[in-house]
């Protein structure tokens, strides 16, 4: 039995009940939805070496936070739970962290595929990548930071032996989630429509996604299967050694540019879409089968890539 297969078997029982446990928690707008993040986390966990897996387990099991269950896969949704925990009250957590989940690179700011153009657009979306103020931990960093910067900051804290234990725990919990966000194309692109949130859809029989962003967050992921652990297993078994090696290269900025390009070239490709009116009478799109046929392979690969890359970042920081 391979290392990944053994790891899948070891955590299968916990994964079986995870969907039911999470379903009881409050809903909210989340990149990939809970299912996508669970798929990514499952793949990452299976690709961790034994020592790294034991370390992340130990760090998470010592966490008393009850926003999610304490295991690795459940914690993949923690950053969303944390953000939304006071969304309709004080909004302190919400306002402090909501921008950390995305980087709005405008489609019309980088119409050409040349990497220098894309990098300049990403830099602009991330405010020039300002460093953390001296003495400030990543978990208390400026609210205006983008997802690329937060992945880099939390990965650095996870790697550093001088990071205090409470901050290292937060770095791990945010990383498990933000690496997933980094691979949702509409969290790295915008067409003056808040990442597709303002593109209304009429998608009968397609999981009822109300807008383009939600369609990519959850609608397409649910087309892969009803149980995240089984979807993760299917995707993981299809990953070749060469793919894992190739995907492990680069860093957060490179991965962000890949996601942006997929949004520009696939998510915002309206070929075959039909312009209709929503029940409200406002303009909407019906995407259709041709759109879905182009989008599903992207979703499959992005989920798999995110899992591999999350494992790489965590392995690099294991003691």
Image (cartoon, helix red, strand yellow):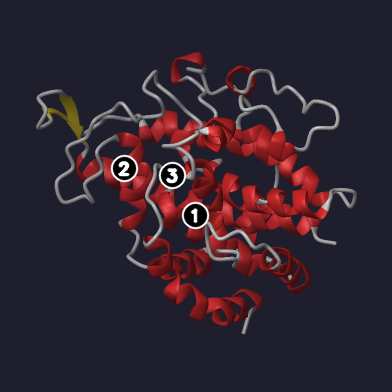
Q: CA distance from mark 1 to mark 3?
A: 9 Å
> Going by the picture, which residue comes out furthest to the bottom?
1
Q: CA distance from mark 3 to mark 2?
A: 11 Å
Q: Residue at x 36, y 43 (%)?
A: 216
Is label 1 in a helix, a strand or a loop?
helix
Give the x, y percent position of residue 126: 62, 23
Give the x, y percent position of residue 69: 54, 65
Q: Is residue 193 left or right of residue 174?
A: left
Q: Residue at x 48, y 40 (%)?
A: 86
Closer to the eye: label 3 or 2 = 3
Q: Is residue 55 left or right of residue 286?
A: right
Compared with 44, 15 (above or below) is: below
Which residue is more in the foreground, 138 or 112?
Answer: 138
Which residue is more in the foreground, 144 or 299?
Answer: 144
Give the x, y percent position of residue 239: 55, 63
Q: Residue at x 36, y 22 (%)?
A: 193
* Picture disc at residue 30: 3
Give the x, y percent position of residue 45: 62, 66
Tag 1 and tag 3, C-beta contact below 8 Å: yes
Q: Which residue is mark 1?
A: 37
Q: Which residue is mark 2?
A: 215
Compared with 3, 98 (above or below) is: above
């Amino acid at each position: 039995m391979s290392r990944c297969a053994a790891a899948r078997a070891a955590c299968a029982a916990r994964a079986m009940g995870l969907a039911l446990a999470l379903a009881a928690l409050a809903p909210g707008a989340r990149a990939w939805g809970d299912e996508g993040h669970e798929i990514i986390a499952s793949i990452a966990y299976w690709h961790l070496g034994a020592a790294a897996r034991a370390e992340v387990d130990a760090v998470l099991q010592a966490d008393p936070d009850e926003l999610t269950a304490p295991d690795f896969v459940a914690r993949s949704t923690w950053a969303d739970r944390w953000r939304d925990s006071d969304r309709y009250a004080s909004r302190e957590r919400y306002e402090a962290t909501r921008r950390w989940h995305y980087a709005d690179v405008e489609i019309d700011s980088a119409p050409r595929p040349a990497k220098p153009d894309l990098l300049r657009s990403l830099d602009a979306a991330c405010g020039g990548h300002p460093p953390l103020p001296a003495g400030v931990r990543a978990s208390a960093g400026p609210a205006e930071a983008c997802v690329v910067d937060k992945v880099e900051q939390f990965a650095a804290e996870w790697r550093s032996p001088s990071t205090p234990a409470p901050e290292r725990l937060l770095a791990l919990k945010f990383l498990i989630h933000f690496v997933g966000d980094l691979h949702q194309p509409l969290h790295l692109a915008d067409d003056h429509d808040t990442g597709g949130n303002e593109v209304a859809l009429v998608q009968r029989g397609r999981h009822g996604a109300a807008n383009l962003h939600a369609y990519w967050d959850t609608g397409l992921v649910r087309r892969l299967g009803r149980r995240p652990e089984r979807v993760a297993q299917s995707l993981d078994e299809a990953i070749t050694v060469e793919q894992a090696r190739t995907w492990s290269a680069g860093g957060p900025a490179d991965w962000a540019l890949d996601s942006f390009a997929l949004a520009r070239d696939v998510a915002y490709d309206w070929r075959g879409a039909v312009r209709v009116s929503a029940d409200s009478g406002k303009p909407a799109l019906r995407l259709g089968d041709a759109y879905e046929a182009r989008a599903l392979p992207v979703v499959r690969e992005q989920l798999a890539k995110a899992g591999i890359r999350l494992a790489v970042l965590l392995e690099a920081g294991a003691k």
